[in-house]
Amino acid sequence: MTEKVYITSKQMATFICPKCQKSKTVNVSKYASLDKIVKVKVSCPCGYGYTSILEKRKKYRKATDLPGSFVHFVNGRQVGGGLMKVKDLSTSGLKIHINTQHQCTVGDVILVEFSLDDSHRTLIKKKVIVRNIVGQNIGTEFAPTEPIDKALGFYLFS
């Protein structure tokens, strides 16, 4: 299994051997600026070899498959909406997959509503800003006016 390793702001990454749990922190600045997925082969002093993916994101993302709905706004006016699935979550945003050929553009505002699959089925209702679009997948960032949600923080790290 390939593990993700996060690059710090100082261009360092800590690799942890899945077999013996020894860790080693390495300067990965030569990979940080590459605009593609970077897989590195790591050899541990214990003799075990494994592959890791260098993750350039600043925030941890949790893969999900949570159903929900969205309302699309342009210039403060509702122009559409529909069903969606939350594909991943972080403390700064989420990626959604919409079920229709809905026309969004980067910078648009979407109101998303979904429930976490935690024990309380916590309802999340957030305003997000579209940051990128790939087919029916939309990468979003929480609007600056949205408060930090404690339940979402607990969910991400559980």
Image (cartoon, rainbow, N blue to C red):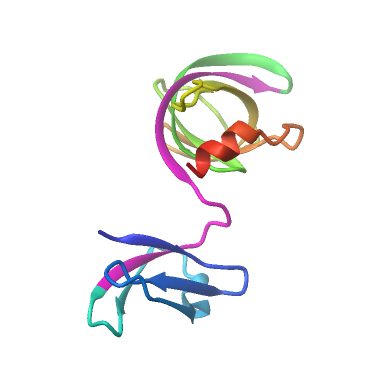
The location of residue 22, given as percent across then percent down, is 37, 75
Is residue 21 in view from this perspective? yes
The location of residue 43, given as percent across then percent down, is 29, 81
Give me the residue at 51% from left, 45% from top: 157
Give me the residue at 49% from left, 20% from top: 121
Q: Quadrant of the N terminus?
A: bottom left
Specify the farthest residue to the bottom.
45
The residues colored magenta run 50-74
> Residue 44 falls in which quadrant of the image?
bottom left
Q: Against 130, is 126 above or below?
A: above
The location of residue 145, given as percent across then percent down, is 77, 32
Q: Is residue 72 left or right of residue 115?
A: right
The location of residue 93, given as percent across then percent down, is 58, 40
The magenta stretch spans residue 68? yes
Total number of numbered discs in the rendering: 0
Q: Nearer the viewer, residue 117 or 37?
A: 117
Most common secondary structure along the magenta stretch: strand
Q: Against 9, is 157 above or below?
A: above
Q: Is residue 4 left or right of residue 73?
A: left
Q: Against 90, is 75 above or below?
A: above
Q: Is residue 107 left or right of residue 53?
A: right
Give me the residue at 52% from left, 36% from top: 155
Specify the farthest residue to the right.
145
Give me the residue at 41% from left, 31% from top: 136
Q: Against 30, is 80 above or below?
A: above
> Residue 72 falls in which quadrant of the image?
top right
The magenta stretch spans residue 158? no
Q: Nearer the viewer, residue 146 or 133?
A: 146
Is residue 131 in view from this perspective? no
> Residue 50 falls in which quadrant of the image?
bottom left
Q: Nearer the viewer, residue 71 or 79?
A: 71
